[in-house]
Amino acid sequence: MRRNRWAAAMAALLCVFLWGCGADTAYSEQHAVALIAKSTETEFWLSVFAGAEAAATEYNLKLTITGPKTEEDYEAQNQMVADAVEAGAQAIVFSAIDYENNASAIDDAAKQGTKIVAIDSSVDSQMVSTYIGTDNYAAGQMAAQAALDRVEGTLRVGIVNYDVSSANGQERERGARDLFSSTGRAEVTAVINTLAEAGHAQADTVRMLADHPEINVLLAFNEPTSVGAAQAVEELGLSETVFLVGFDSNVATVEGLQTGAVDALIVQNPYAMGYLGVESAYKLLSGQGAGLTAVVDTSTQIVDRSNLFSMDSQKALFAFESR
């Protein structure tokens, strides 16, 4: 009799340690989530991964993180989607390199029961449950406004963009163009679509500035293109004559703010994209998907030399420690 009571007591205690018999067991069931990024190298994506890993820890998820070697290789991304499904991923958190050419892979994954969350750059699929990221059109307008507010006279603008098939880059350019056009004091003189790699962006920006010496404003729309554009401005000694607005936080661009090669940065919130993306995947897998909104706009702010050392700017620029 005593032995039976002891066994019952131990069983009850075990239930407590295992989240309770019949209590909320959602966290104890470890769902598998795959995050497929555009890249695994830049500080932007490292911050995304830090946020994603924090959410995975909080919600007891088995998280895998992959991405291609370059931000142009949509075919590698498509294979990663198929591989993730084959490996048992129940949800995919995805940032599309190519809005159209990534769509079929996402559709195929969703048809097999995989939940889809888009972050940073969306994809042309009706299977996406929610998009989490910057309002890219508004961010492009923010970049244009930063130049309009700080440069007198006529703005002759050069745009340094990345892959023409990437939805977020094209939305940023459209937002900037629309605002410039509405003012009557700015014209877009030249546009380049370069590889999302600093060395290529630098070389292409140098050529653009050589071909169009009238350019007095540069807009660069992601982290690698911003680093490359800043390096081009420094190489040509144009810090005093060319006003550069870049995107995202990078050691090189933050240093450029202090030296004058960069004049303003549009800083996104990649940590929030990663965290909320994985959190949304958990909610979809645990039956809470009905509460998700179709679009979640993460915060964006302008950092320049006037507010570089403010607490808010420092938090935005240095939101995580390297993995």
Image: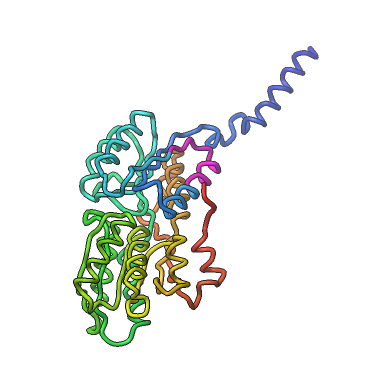
Residue at far bottom of view:
153
Q: Is residue 260 above or below residue 75?
A: below
Between residues 163 and 30, which one lies in front from this camera angle? 163
Residue beneath the point at 32% across and 63% down: 221
Residue in view at x 26 percent, y 48 percent: 72
Q: Residue at x 59, y 34 (%)?
A: 23
Would you say residue 59 sits in the magenta stretch? Answer: yes
Residue drawn where x is 63% and y is 32% of the image: 20
Going by the image, does 246 lie left or right of 9? Answer: left
Residue 101 seen in the current view: yes
Image location (x, y in percent) of residue 292: 41, 51
**Hey, which quadrant is residue 75 in on the image?**
top left
Q: Quadrant of the N terminus?
A: top right
Q: Quadrant of residue 252?
A: bottom left
Splitting the image into 4 quarters, where does residue 257 fall?
bottom left
251 lies left or right of 115 = right
Identify whether 26 is placed above or below 280.
Answer: above
Which coloring applies here?
A: rainbow
From this viewpoint, is residue 138 visible? no
- Image position, residue 121 (x, y; %): 32, 53
Choose between 204 and 281: the one closer to the eye: 204
Q: Where is residue 143 shown, x and y percent of the image?
A: 34, 71
Image position, residue 150 (x, y; %):
37, 82
Image: 103 above or below 188:
above
Viewer-proximal residue among 226 and 179 = 226
Give the magenta part as a residue range. Answer: 52-64
Q: Residue furthest right?
A: 2
Tally of numbered tags: 0
Is residue 165 within the magenta segment? no
